[in-house]
């Protein structure tokens, strides 16, 4: 195999697929990137696969001889990254040995590879459900909910985001047990049914690991604006395909919690805040709150101002008042300030509504201008007087 390509294109491809290379491989070949070259199309393809997440990308180059070889990911990444930008790079692998010669105009490197025969094939979905999804809608659904997924591997199913692809909209949800984010993205023109099994009774619902979604987010962000992305799903495997990239990931097995029943139907108290003013005040108060428990109190008296405060014992305290629209009895409620900030930062509307009943029951934040598009439920913190 022998190829010549642009350093920048090769480097970008390596950085992309190396995210799917295992840092603790169960087999030496899983620490490598698979490089394949096709002389008939002049296409160079790179693949990383850790048996859970797989990323493949391809780009154009000059292929003098077709072939395939696997190369240590970390070494290849560091070498190519340090080569002069935009210069030609050649890679040559001898047929009768596993040596790879990398040449640039500044010098050469010899690496030991592993033959490609033992490299595992990326799973491809041959049957099951296939959809065309609108990249911008999927990206919005992902960004609106990914932050609330759990980091606790003991709660395996909660370490991902649940997506439900309905006939005319996309719903995404994530929870870590303390908070819940749900986004509804209208999608009437964008999700196309591709097989007969996808109906209103059998909406496709999959839970995708957060780690995989961070790479899928990058893939979708890079795509050209007019491309839809193809999604294939079958037997615990999801494959996303755009023009020159493929990402395959296992789904998280199990039935995702029925989160809609956690959201109260009625609220006795509704407060209307300017979103930016609330975020700014919380960020200032968080300086003190983060010194200890990360708890902020919101005190609402029958005036047009809400008091936000934090008390860090033996360190100090902070208090700030911001405008609020509310008419009702005096009310106190406390939250983890980080939970509040992460949820508020994905709300795009000018004003946000805080709805609650008691200081001990779930509260929700919703954008004022599009109440159904995003719901963020947070459990209050119990504060001793």
Image (cartoon, grey):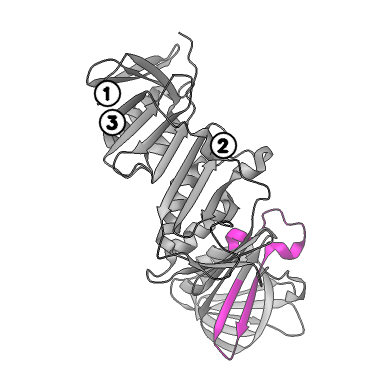
1 or 2: tag closer to the N-terminus:
2
Q: Name the quadrant containing residue 77.
A: bottom right
Is 29 within the magenta? yes
3 or 1: tag closer to the N-terminus:
3
Residue 79 seen in render: no
- Quarter of the image containing the C terminus? top left
Picture coordinates of residue 383 (x, y %)?
48, 14
Direction from residue 336 to residue 351 in the image, left or right: left
Direction from residue 303 to residue 251 in the image, left or right: right
Picture coordinates of residue 42 (x, y %)?
54, 87
Is 12 within the magenta? no
- Residue for badge 2: 176
> Are the residues at dot 3 and dot 1 in contact (C-beta closer than 8 Å)?
no
Q: Secondary structure at mark 3?
A: strand
Q: Is residue 208 above or below residue 341?
A: below
Picture coordinates of residue 271 (x, y %)?
31, 27
Give the label on residue 273, or none: 3
Direction from residue 385 to residue 58 in the image, left or right: right
Q: Nearer the viewer, mark 3 or mark 1?
A: 1
What whole-number distance in Å separates the C-alpha atoms at marks 3 and 1?
A: 9 Å
Segment colored magenta? 18-46
Q: Secondary structure at mark 2?
A: loop
Q: Secondary structure at mark 1?
A: loop
Nearer to me, 78 or 106: 78
Q: Name the quadrant containing residue 186.
A: bottom left
- Residue for badge 1: 326
Residue under the image location 61 percent in, 82 percent down: 37
Q: Is residue 357 above or below residue 173?
A: above
Residue under the image location 51 percent in, 65 percent down: 81
What whole-number distance in Å separates the C-alpha atoms at marks 2 and 3?
A: 26 Å
Q: Is residue 22 above or below residue 241?
A: above
What whole-number distance in Å separates the C-alpha atoms at marks 1 and 2?
A: 30 Å
């Amino acid at each position: 195999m022998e190829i010549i390509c642009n350093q920048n294109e090769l480097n970008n491809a390596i950085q992309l697929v190396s995210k799917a290379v295992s840092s603790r491989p169960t087999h030496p070949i899983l620490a490598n990137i698979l490089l394949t070259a096709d002389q008939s199309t002049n296409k160079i393809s790179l693949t990383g696969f850790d048996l859970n997440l797989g990323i493949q990308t391809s780009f154009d180059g000059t292929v003098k001889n077709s072939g395939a070889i696997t190369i240590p990911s970390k070494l290849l990444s560091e070498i190519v990254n340090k080569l002069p930008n935009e210069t030609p790079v050649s890679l040559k692998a001898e047929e009768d040995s596993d040596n790879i010669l990398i040449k640039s105009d500044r010098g050469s490197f010899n690496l030991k590879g592993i033959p490609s025969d033992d490299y595992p094939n990326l799973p491809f979905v041959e049957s099951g459900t296939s959809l065309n999804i609108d990249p911008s809608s999927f990206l919005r659904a992902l960004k609106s909910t990914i932050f609330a997924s759990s980091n606790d591997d003991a709660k395996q199913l909660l370490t991902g985001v649940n997506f439900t692809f309905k006939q005319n909209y996309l719903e995404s949800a994530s929870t870590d047990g303390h908070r819940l984010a749900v986004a509804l993205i209208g999608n009437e023109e964008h999700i196309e049914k591709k097989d007969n099994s996808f109906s209103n009774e059998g909406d496709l619902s999959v839970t995708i690991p957060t780690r995989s979604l961070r790479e899928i987010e990058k893939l979708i962000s890079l795509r050209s604006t007019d491309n839809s992305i193809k999604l294939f799903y079958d037997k615990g495997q999801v494959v996303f395909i755009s023009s020159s990239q493929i990402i395959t990931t296992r789904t998280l097995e199990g039935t995702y919690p029925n989160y809609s029943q956690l959201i109260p139907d009625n609220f006795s108290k509704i407060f209307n805040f300017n979103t930016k003013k609330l975020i700014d005040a919380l960020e200032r108060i968080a300086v003190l709150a983060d010194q200890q428990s990360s708890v902020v109190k919101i005190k609402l008296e029958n005036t047009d101002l809400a008091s936000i405060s934090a008390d860090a014992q033996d360190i100090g305290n902070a208090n700030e008042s911001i405008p609020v629209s509310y008419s009702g009895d005096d009310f106190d409620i406390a939250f983890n300030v980080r939970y509040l900030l992460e949820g508020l930062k994905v709300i795009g509307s000018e004003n946000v509504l805080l709805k609650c009943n008691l200081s001990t029951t779930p509260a929700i934040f919703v954008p004022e201008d599009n109440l159904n598009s995003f719901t963020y439920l947070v459990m209050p913190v119990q504060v001793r007087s």
